Amino acid sequence: MKQIKDLEAKLSNARNLIASGKIDDDDFRALKTGYTEQIVHLEERLTTIQRDSTNVEDLLNEGIEHLLKLDKGAKKADTADLRRLVSAMFPENFTFDGVNIRTARMNTILQYIYLITKN
């Protein structure tokens, strides 16, 4: 956004320069073409970024919905499915000694959920 505003300010300045006779028509056209192309390119990138962030938000909402339904799926799951679920949640060195659970690393999403729940 700042880059677009800067380029628009430069284009406005170029208009002032041609109006005051400090640059000729050819120089103005060259400046206008260059600035306009850069503005169009930046606006296209901005549109793409906004579209991508919407997609990320949709994916995040979908993921949260799936997490909220996780308990229902776990109740219906067989042993192999439960093993895959636990492996996804605790990807490294998961051990259970009958009472305590130990793991080297927890899934990143679960860490964030734990922090949110804790606070």
Image (tube, rainbow, N blue to C red):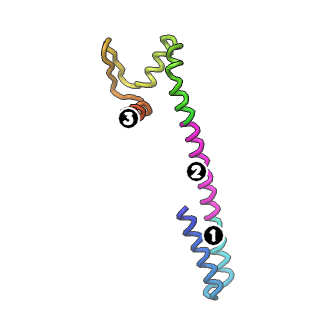
Tag on residue 43? none
Residue on which the image places disc 2: 49
Tell whether label 2 touches label 1 (CB within 8 Å). Answer: no
Q: Position of residue 82 (x, y in %)?
A: 47, 16
Q: As shown in the figure, which amino acid type bears the numbered disc 1?
A: Gly
**In the shown orientation, is residue 61 left or right of residue 88?**
right
Callout 2 touching callout 3 (CB < 8 Å): no
Identified at 60% across, 60% down, the residue is: 42
**Location of residue 69 with respect to 4 vertically, above or below:** above
The image quadrant that residue 18 belongs to is bottom right
What's the mark number on residue 34? Answer: 1
Residue count near mark 2 (Cα–Cα under 10 Å), binned few <14, some 14–19, many ≥20: few
Task: Indicate the secondary structure of the residue bearing disc 2.
Answer: helix
Q: Please provide percent x and percent y for residue 114.
A: 39, 31
Q: Give the residue at mark 3.
A: 115
Tell me which label, 3 or 1, sits earlier in the chain: 1
CA neighbours of label 3 inside 10 A, class few (<14), some (14 to 19), many (20+):
few
Query: At numbered mark 1, what does the secondary structure look like: helix, strand or loop?
Result: helix
Query: Range of the magenta residues?
Result: 38-60
Vertical arrangement, residue 46 with respect to residue 32, above or below: above
